[in-house]
């Protein structure tokens, strides 16, 4: 799993490449949360376009980051063009509370 976490237009941009599963989520969660709370950012953009696999642990990771943002009056946006990931998000019900955008720029504009 490759993970990039950086500030982008007053949002925390998290880009994933590889597999997001029960083997990787704890390490990923720690890295995201450290940057999120250290930089005192309200919103998170999760770029899932580079994922090749995601299981329920990935859904839990997204839900936890969503809760962190809600607690700080922020929002989460997802960037995805992956049919498999989109299906997982739809089945989990996350699409009812988090918007999905085709590009990082579009997500940043809507937060």
Image: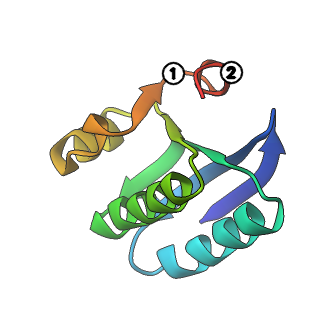
Return the mark for residue 102: 1
Residue 33 position within the rendered picture, expressed as x and y whole percent measured from the top left: 65, 69
Q: Quadrant of the N terminus?
A: bottom right
Q: Is residue 18 visible?
A: yes
Q: Quadrant of residue 2?
A: bottom right
- Residue under label 2: 105
5, 38: nearer the viewer: 38
Q: Quadrant of residue 34?
A: bottom right
68 sits left or right of 15 in the view: left
Residue at the outermost left position? 91
- The residue drawn where x is 43% and y is 29% is 100
- If the image is split into quadrants, where does the C terminus sit? top right
Above-or-below relation of 99 to 52: above
In space, the residues marked 1 and 2 are separated at their CA atoms by 9 Å
Residue at 49% x, 74% y is 25
Q: Is residue 89 above or below residue 26?
A: above
Q: How is the image coloured?
A: rainbow
């Amino acid at each position: 799993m490759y993970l990039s976490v950086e500030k982008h237009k007053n949002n925390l941009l998290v880009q994933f490449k590889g597999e997001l599963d029960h083997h990787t989520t704890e390490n990923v969660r720690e890295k995201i949360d450290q940057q999120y709370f250290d930089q005192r950012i309200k919103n998170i953009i999760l770029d899932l376009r580079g994922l090749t696999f995601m299981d329920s642990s990935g859904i839990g990771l997204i839900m936890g980051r969503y809760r962190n943002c809600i607690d700080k009056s922020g929002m989460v946006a997802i960037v995805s063009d992956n049919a498999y990931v989109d299906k997982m998000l739809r089945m989990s019900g996350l699409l009812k509370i988090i918007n999905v955008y085709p590009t990082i720029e579009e997500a940043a504009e809507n937060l």
